[in-house]
Amino acid sequence: MCGCQLQRVGEDVSERLDYTPGVFTVEQHVRGKWACRECETLIQAPVPAQVIDKGIATAGLLAHVMVAKFADHLPLYRQEKIFGRAGLAMARSTLAQWVGQTGVQLQPLVDALRETVLAQGVIHADETPVQMLAPGQKKTHRAYVWAYCSTPFSPLKAVVYDFSPSRAGEHARNFLGEWNGKLVCDNFAGYKASFQQGITEIGCMAHARRKFFDLHATNKSQLAEQALHSIGGLYEIERQARDMTDEDRWRIRQEKAAPILNALHTWMLAQRDLVPEGSAIAKALDYSLKRWTALARYLEDGAVPIDNNAVENQIRPWALGRSNWLFAGSLRSGKRAAAIMSLIQSARMNGHDPYAYLKDVLTRLPTQRASEIYELLPQKWAAV
């Protein structure tokens, strides 16, 4: 330094990213009391309605617990430890009660979401196993979560999960009820009874392709490669038609996809007579040939997708979740999880932040009219 007086000639600004762990605050609601000395009456404003009556948790805290458990897959015992590090001693049993009570309050909204999904003419269906603690025992058995969602071509973006104690087809029939649209699904036998009652089966081309893909990956089968090439042509047409209207999609399928599919069918029939019975390529061919009518139905309706990939993407959160919380504690807790995850995942599908959505819904729900419950559905909701 020269000792002379310095003049500021500018500045450099640097930025660094910091993080502050979750902070808990206490809201105070002051309700004044007003008395009339003449008639000896006391007036006081009522307690604001809330999701958990007389509970200490705000809508924001409840939304945080739900999103942490069902979107970020943090079991309650981990949340209990995280809260403890922030200076709040919150028992896991209390968190479990909040989850249960919140699930009960959200059930009417989930029922409305189910109605909107079943109002669609075409829906996807898939199921995945989840371990559930057997009643009165210290061991688990295999339960199932079923997912039903709208198609990529539908303006509705929604998924509904249904938790059941087994994979029996009656659970799918009970969920679908009197619905008789077009069901995109794999070849699970549990759906067969529904097809006999008026529901139209739509096959999954991705499942058919997977048989040939696995065969080609294992032993470089030339026959499998030929099948993959033809199926690849069908998917190229689907990429071209992705953003078209249903009518235009139907037209391009009739013009370009139908000849490829018909040629593929003829080729498969010819090859099936040539390959050895019981061979891997015979099994791959049989998988498609036995389901050909269902696999080809997408050509008839531009609103029908070529495969079931859309719902398989909605099953993934359960696959992630079960690796963290391992099992459902009971059938009731499994159903609560399915209900809350239906709303969270549907919110994601509509581009919403699950926390912002649930916080607002839990704030408005106690005073929302039953006739206006549909306004709180993810596809209708908008941040205020």
Image: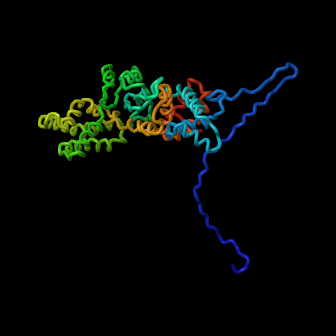
User: Residue lying farthest right?
Assistant: 38
Residue at horizontal 42 percent and vertical 25 percent from the top: 165
In this rendering, position of residue 190 left or right of residue 222: right
The one nearer the camera, 179 or 17, is 17
Picture coordinates of residue 342, whole percent (x, y): 48, 32
The x, y position of residue 131, in whole percent, is 42, 31
Q: Is residue 177 visible?
A: yes
Q: Quadrant of residue 211?
A: top left
Q: Quadrant of the N terminus?
A: bottom right
Q: Position of residue 279 (x, y in %)?
A: 17, 37
Residue 275 pos. (x, y %):
13, 37
Rendering colour mode: rainbow
Lateral position of residue 232 relative to residue 364, left or right: left
Q: In this rendering, does residue 115 appear at all? A: no
**For the C terminus, which image quadrant?**
top right
The number of numbered badges drawn on the structure is 0
Q: Residue furthest left?
A: 274
Give the quadrant of residue 254.
Answer: top left
